Amino acid sequence: MMKYLKRYCDILGPSGMEDAIREAIIEDIKDSGAEYETDPIGNLIVFKKGKNRRNKKVLFSAHTDEVGFMIKYIDEEGYLWFDAVGGIDRRVVSGKRIVFCESGINGVVASKAIHMQTLEERGKCEAISEMHIDIGASSREDAKKYITIGDCCTFEPNYEEFGNGLVRSKALDDRFGCAALVAMINSELEYDTYFAFNTCEEIGCDGAKEVSHRLRPDIVIALEATTAGDILGVPKSKCACSVGSGAVLSLMDRSTIYDKELVLLATEVAKEKNIKWQYKNVVAGGNEAGVYQRAATGARVLAISAPARYIHSASNVLSLSDMQAVADLAAAINERSFD
């Protein structure tokens, strides 16, 4: 998994612009013997034959998109006004370096400098609608040579390993999940298995809706990143999960009550294989599992997540060992027949 991780994180691909990451994944699985296709909205759907067939259709899913920004206006001075693509906390935006997907142009997110703020404005975070992007243009005409309304950008690629086995990067949510699935596809499988690399998870899981109707899976295992709470000032009772404590199994979030038998199976497999794991002990967030559970004919669902500090920011922080635990647990679960 790790040999794909940095390359996938460095690719620019906010919701609706996942072509580059999809093509990278295709390049990495084309010699695996798997069958694959791209559907009309950009999902990559893969089928890999195993040594045996299952009675049930099992799908492993990860999303290819990341959070980002879309340009909505260019002013007379050449500054770019924008809105968020996906759920981004405005506190993590100002001052960040960004890169445009279409042109590769660099810029910086700017807001009113502190020495120009009124006393009432100081100490308050501006709304994203009040921020702008500076690409060094001198006028609207100059900016329009490089940028048009509707262009998208993301945080600048910044993958780095640091500390005691940690990684910081944009887009670890959910490029690590994509890397884990690619590693599974390139391995020898015990059973026939489906895989989905979905678009537009960050704006409502649109890709998963299409995959649900196309494949109608019986069982879905979603690989995701989830918010860790092991940061300064968060009490243990509200710490959803901790970086370095292993793969995260969710019982319930704001969109899903997970299949109890699948959660029990995951805990049993983790113990059997000596894979480090933890429960997510706060009901918060959601992911594609909720869509798979409700769409088409419905499916039994399980989420295996890696705890992430500072999720949906320029510097997600995850543990290499946690990501490997998620990959190992997913691969081990896929050795079961589910009969």
Image (cartoon, rainbow, N blue to C red):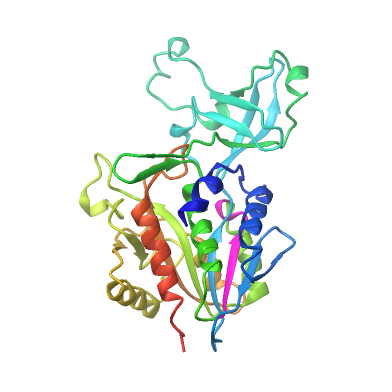
User: Does the magenta run of residues contain 273?
Assistant: no
Q: Considering only vertical position in the picture, is 210 above or below 335?
A: above
What's the residue at 51%, 67% (across, down)? 184
Q: Considering only vertical position in the picture, is 125 above or below 140?
A: below
* Image x and y of residue 287, in percent: 49, 60
Taking depth in this image into account, of 337 and 215 the one nearest to the observer is 337
Q: Is residue 40 left or right of residue 223?
A: right
* Image x and y of residue 170, in percent: 49, 41
Tell me if I can see residue 304 in this picture.
no
Q: Considering only vertical position in the picture, is 289 above or below 162?
A: below
Q: Is residue 165 left or right of residue 129?
A: left
Taking depth in this image into account, of 186 and 269 the one nearest to the observer is 186
What's the residue at 21%, 51% (across, down)? 236
What's the residue at 40%, 62% (across, down)? 326
Query: Given the current orientation, which residue lies at the most extreme front position?
Result: 31
- The boundaries of the magenta stretch are 192-202
User: Does the magenta run of residues contain 196?
Assistant: yes
For the image, the number of numbered tags is: 0
Q: Quadrant of residue 263?
A: bottom left
Query: Given the current orientation, which residue lies at the most extreme top position?
Result: 115
Q: Quadrant of residue 26?
A: bottom right
Q: Is residue 145 left or right of residue 328?
A: right
Tell me if I can see residue 202 in this picture.
yes
